[in-house]
Structure formats: C-alpha cells, structure tokens
Amino acid sequence: MPEKELKLQMINVGLRLYQAGLAVARSGNLSCRLDDAHILITATGTFLGSLKEDDIVKVNLATLKPEGKINPSSELPLHSLVYKNFGAQVVVHCHPPLINGYFAVAKQLKAVTFETKFYLGSVPVVAQETPTVTSPQEVVDALKTNNLVVLKNHGTVAASDNFEDALSITEALEEAVKSAALARLFDKDFLDQLDTSLKAELKRNDPVYEMFSRPHIQAIVDLVNKDEFIARKGKEMGLTVKLAIRLDDSQQAYKFNFKEGQITELGSDDQAPFVISAPANVWEQVFLGKLDCFVAVTQGKMKLSGQLGQLSKWYVPFTRLFALFKEVKIK
Ligand code: 13P
C-alpha cells in the first residue's frame, strides 16, 4: 500500500482509539510495515486522537534511523522487535483505562463470555519496571501465545496482520474486563470452577513425551477417554466427529475419531472434516498450555480447515480436550 494511504489509515485508527476512550492525551503509539526495510510509526508525544500526516515517521527497520527531523515514538524498540520476530503488519499500543484498572489488581483475565474465550483466551500479562518498555523481548515472548499482551500498569500491545484485527482484540479486551468487573460485583466469590476441579483431578508427575510422537498423542487419547467430563458432555452434545491435527512442514498428522464423546480410533492421517494445523513452535505453546486452540485459530496462529462455527457447537468438550492436551508433558 502507498505511504500516504497507510498514513491515512493510521490517522483513522488513532481517531477510533480516541473515540472509544482507549487512547487519550499523548498516550499510545501506532506503527505498520511500509516495505521490507521500513516501518511507519507515530512520532513521540503525539495525540493519537488528532494525528496529522507529519506526525508519522518513516524508520529503517535495520538501523532504527528515522527519515527527517521528527523523533519516532519512545516505544520504537518494542515495535521494531515485534516486526523482527513476527510477520505482523501492524502494532497498536494504547493505555485503555478499564484494562489498566483490572490488571492492576487481577493476575489474569476471568473470561465471562464465549466471545472472550474464543477471540482472546488467556491474555498474557507482562510487568515492566519502567514507564517505557525497556525489556521488549518479554513482550515478544508473550506475543507468541496471543496477538494481544497486557503491560501491567501501562496498557496493551496488539500485533496483527491489519489494523482492524488489532483494534478488534484491543476493544474486545476492554469490553471483557468490563463484564468481568460486573460479574465480580454480582458475586464476590466468582471463580472458574472447571479450572479448579481440573487441577485437583490430575496427577502431575507423569512421563515426558517427544512432541507429536505417537506415544504423546496416544497418552492424550488415554487421558481423554478416562475423562468423565468429556464422556458426559460428549454424550449430551452428540460429539461424533472426526478431527485431525497436523504438524506443518512434516507428514505428521493424527485423526481423532470421536463417537459420543469417546475417541474410538486414533488414525495417522488428516482425512477429516476438521483439520487443525500449525508449525511446531505454535503446537509447542499449545501443548505447554500457554496457547488456547480456539484463540489460536481465531487469531490466525493456527489454521483450521472446516467451519469454526460448526466445530464450536462442541465448544465445551473441545475446550476440555485442549485443556487436557497440556496435562501430558512434552520434552
Ligand atoms: P510516545 O509518545 O513516545 O509514543 O509514548 C507514549 C506512550 O504511550 C509510551 O508508552
């Protein structure tokens, strides 16, 4: 896209953040890729709500040298490290007030709507010791598990393929913490009972497996078939479907043949109406329990062939299945 058009997009994004109350005063900064070697980033000290073309600086990604006399955002080290680590096209950083208030006291997001679970999952929270991010690698590590990261006592960082998606997850989190705060008003002991019971039920000193090896996936199948919750919900919801998982750039795939909530057969192929595929680094985050499969699909970190809408009718047993994934330890 031409430079001028990208600048106009950034001006619109700044205005929308301001109008939504997510970026007021001189807080927040935006950037996007211009070409292989350059990014555009807002200048330091700008008002995102009333950006002008001159407030946007072209910066060489390799040297971090700006073109012209205006200084780029003080968060340039963070923005540039994101582009060096991911294929992201845009980075949006802002200081949403409800998110900042919520995470000042809460350690993690208590998702109270399906939408939140689907599109945001467990948003990672990273603490920094300075007002400007000075340990950007920690933020980059967190972005491997979610396109949105909370900077404790500071704000959010969203990295995405386009501004629409980055705005969407940022706005969705502000809405989600509003709902969580309301739920807390109605019930002070508001707790996610499923998580608690899952932790209580499972033993933790089990064997360690080579990721995506047959013994690894078989251990998951054994765990699933012993799980009373999946059995009950699977029966209630008619969980009879074939779902395959595939490791990108390899021939490895496994097909789970579900019948009424039980896995009756484990195949070594991906001939299934639903196939979830991802590279090894993404699967690793999933099996470590740091990345939720549904969120990974909605945020584009994993690919799903088959309709997410259809798969989501078994949202409850599949959420449990994915939670069980992390209970089988990998090397
Ligand atoms: P800049 O004005 O330097 O972009 O800084 C604003 C900000 O939000 C820092 O986190």
Image: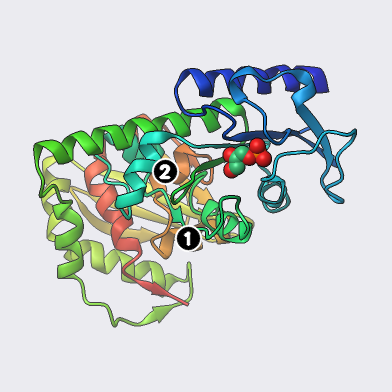
Q: Which residue is rendered at x = 71% and y = 39% of the image?
A: 73
Among numbered discs 1 and 2, the one appearing first in the sequence: 1
Position in image of residue 257 (x %, y %): 31, 52
| Residue situated in front as seen by the camera: 153 or 252 | 153
Q: Which residue is rendered at x = 48% and y = 77% of the image?
A: 331
The numbered dot on residue 27 is none
Secondary structure of residue under mark 1: helix
Q: Is residue 75 above or below residue 206?
A: above
Which residue is denoted by mark 2 in the rendering? 295
Quadrant (top left, top right, bottom left, bottom right) of the N terminus? top right
**Neighbours of disc 1 within 10 Å: few (<14), some (14-19), many (20+):** some
Residue type, label 2 = Val
Position in image of residue 10 (x %, y %): 67, 23
Which residue is denoted by mark 1 in the rendering? 285
Secondary structure of residue under mark 2: helix
Q: Which residue is rendered at x = 37% and y = 45% of the image?
A: 121
- Specify how the rendered protein is coloured: rainbow
Q: Is residue 179 visible?
A: yes
Quadrant assignment for ligand 1? top right
> Dividing the picture into quarters, in which one does residue 115 lie?
top left
Position in image of residue 271 (x %, y %): 46, 46
> Dividing the picture into quarters, in which one does residue 32 lie?
top right
Q: Which residue is rendered at x = 39% and y = 51% of the image?
A: 292
Residue type, label 1 = Gln
* Most distant residue in the right direction: 68
